[in-house]
């Protein structure tokens, strides 16, 4: 059900040092580092993300990505979320910066959280 999730940090550099240490004891490490977002996991798959943004306040959004069987399900999720009152963050599309077959759609739910549906086996959105 859950593909990955992320939290926002007031001090990303301090958070990186902290999670490098504590997750390292469990056998996890940085899998991707975009500077403003870092993904931790194992075997090339980041499951837990840290990020930061300008003006971060005490109530920080959470990012949760739900697994989808295929790109059509990602689009169904996105359309249903928008119809139910979610705000569009990113329409469903390929995200090659994550990996070649990453297809995801992102919305902000009714409580301000960044919610995504993703499949990892898409070919140009099919």
Image (cartoon, grey):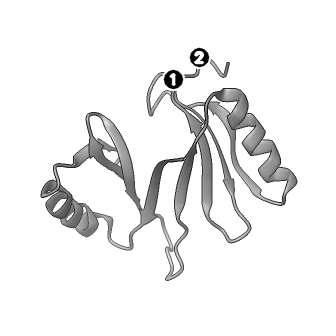
Quadrant housing residue 52 = bottom left
Residue 52 numbered tag? none
Instruction: Specify the farthest residue to the right.
Output: 83
Count of number-bearing discs: 2
Q: Name the residue tied to disc 2.
A: 123
Mark pair 1, 2: CA separation: 6 Å
In primary-sequence order, the first of circles 1 and 2 is 1
Provide residue 110's location: percent of width, then percent of height. 74, 68
- Using residue 87 as the reference point, say whether residue 67 is left or right of it: left
Q: In what element is the residue under mark 2?
A: loop
Instruction: For label 1, count other residues whose C-alpha is less than 10 Å away and answer few (under 14), some (14-19) or many (20+).
Output: some
Quadrant housing residue 45 = top left
Provide residue 66's location: percent of width, then percent of height. 57, 47
Residue at 14% across / 61% down in the picture?
Answer: 21
Residue at 83% across / 60% down in the picture?
Answer: 85
Residue at 66% across / 68% down in the picture?
Answer: 112
* Residue 37 visible in rendering: no
- Using residue 26 as the reference point, say whether residue 77 is left or right of it: right
Locate the C terminus by quadrant. top right
Nearest the viewer among 74 and 19 is 74
Q: Name the residue tied to disc 1.
A: 101
Look at the numbered discs 1 and 2 and tell me whether their residues touch, using CB distance below 8 Å: yes
Instruction: For label 2, count other residues whose C-alpha is less than 10 Å away and answer few (under 14), some (14-19) or many (20+).
Output: few
Compared to residue 59, the image places residue 3 above or below, namely above
Instruction: Specify the farthest residue to the front.
Output: 1
Compared to residue 109, the image places residue 4 above or below, namely above
Q: In what element is the residue under mark 1?
A: loop
Provide residue 91's location: percent of width, then percent of height. 71, 40
* Residue 66 visible in rendering: yes
- Using residue 64 as the reference point, say whether residue 19 is left or right of it: left
Residue at 62% across / 55% down in the picture?
Answer: 115
């Amino acid at each position: 059900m859950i593909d990955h999730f992320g939290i926002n940090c007031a001090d990303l550099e301090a958070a990186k040092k902290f999670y490098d240490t504590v997750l390292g004891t469990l056998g996890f490490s940085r899998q991707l580092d975009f500077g403003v977002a870092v993904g931790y996991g194992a075997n090339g798959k980041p499951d837990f993300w840290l990020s930061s943004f300008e003006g971060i306040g005490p109530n920080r959004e959470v990012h949760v990505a739900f697994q989808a069987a295929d790109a059509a399900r990602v689009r169904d999720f996105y359309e249903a979320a928008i119809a139910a009152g979610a705000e569009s963050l990113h329409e469903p599309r390929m995200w090659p910066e994550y990996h070649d077959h990453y297809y995801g759609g992102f919305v902000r739910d009714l409580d301000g959280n960044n919610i995504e549906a993703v499949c990892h086996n898409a070919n140009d959105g099919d």
